[in-house]
Image (cartoon, grey):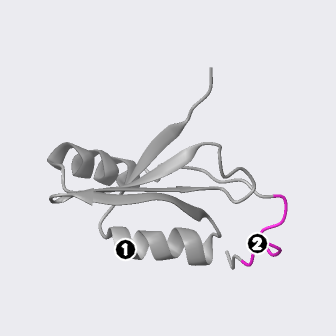
Amino acid sequence: MKIKLTSVYVDDQDKALRFYTEVLGFVKKADFSQGPFRWLTVASPEHPEGTQLQLALNNNPAAKAYQQALFQQNQPAAMFFTDDVQAQGINP
């Protein structure tokens, strides 16, 4: 068994897509809309067929409360690992 998809809640899907692809180097996997709903996922370039991260719009009151509670407790919603952050081009 393995995890194929997980979600993070974002305020702006276009801005989140730019951050995850242009800053972190992820690749866009899915991007389609049906009415007001947009399904948007990214994946690691090292494992493009691996786990996808859904960039879900944070327009659900329960999701917003969850996100705010994690933020207030300084808890990360997701953790990413790399052997060399400088080689990734990320300035911590």
Residue 56 pos. (x, y %): 34, 54
Q: Is residue 27 left or right of residue 9?
A: right
Q: Nearer the viewer, residue 38 or 20?
A: 38
Residue type, numbered disc 2: Gln
Q: Which residues are magenta?
A: 83-89
- Disc 2/disc 1 C-alpha distance (Å): 22 Å
Q: Is residue 60 left or right of residue 11?
A: left
* Callout 2: SS: loop
Residue 4 pos. (x, y %): 55, 36
For image coordinates 29% across by 45% down, the residue present is: 66
Residue 41 pos. (x, y %): 46, 55
Residue at the spot of label 2: 88
Residue 12 pos. (x, y %): 31, 70
Label annotation for residue 72: none
Image quadrant assignment for residue 1? top right
Q: Nearer the viewer, residue 38 or 53?
A: 38
Residue at the spot of label 1: 14
